[in-house]
Image (cartoon, rainbow, N blue to C red):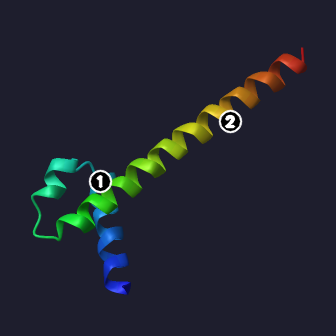
Amino acid sequence: MKRDHHTTEDLHRLLKRGYSADDLRHLQAPADMVERALAQYQEQARQRQHDRNLHNQATYAMRLQSR
């Protein structure tokens, strides 16, 4: 279990460094682990985008209010 966690983190690091999903799929790693890591990474990216959007909306609203 702990080994899987470290492997997943390593896969996330590769994605952050610019490797593509196809690059990861060609590694010598269990396919289910790679797919799980990809799904987690994509979900985290969606969440970061959502958080950025909320932050930008709040900043815009605060600027309107201060006028």
Report how far apart the C-alphas of labels 2 and 1 lie in the structure.
25 Å
Residue drawn at x 30%, y 69% as measured from the top left: 10
Query: Quick check: marks 2 and 1 in contact, CB under 8 Å?
Result: no
Quadrant of the image containing the C terminus: top right
Give the image location of residue 21, x and y in percent.
Answer: 22, 49
The answer to whether 11 appears left or right of 56 in the picture is: left
Name the outermost residue toward the top.
67
Quadrant of the image containing the N terminus: bottom left
Give the image location of residue 63, x and y in percent.
Answer: 81, 21
The answer to whether 65 appears left or right of 55 in the picture is: right
Q: Which residue is mark 1?
A: 15
Disc 2 crowd, CA 10 A, few/some/many (<14, 14-19, 20+): few
In the rendered view, tell whether residue 3 sits above or below residue 30: below
The answer to whether 27 appears left or right of 57 in the picture is: left
Residue drawn at x 33%, y 61% as measured from the top left: 37
Give the image location of residue 23, x and y in percent.
Answer: 14, 52
Residue drawn at x 47%, y 51% as measured from the top left: 44
Q: Secondary structure at mark 2?
A: helix
Task: Tell me the number on the disc at residue 55.
Answer: 2
Number of numbered callouts drawn: 2
- Closer to the chain start, of discs 2 and 1, is 1
In the rendered view, tell whether residue 67 sits above or below residue 47: above
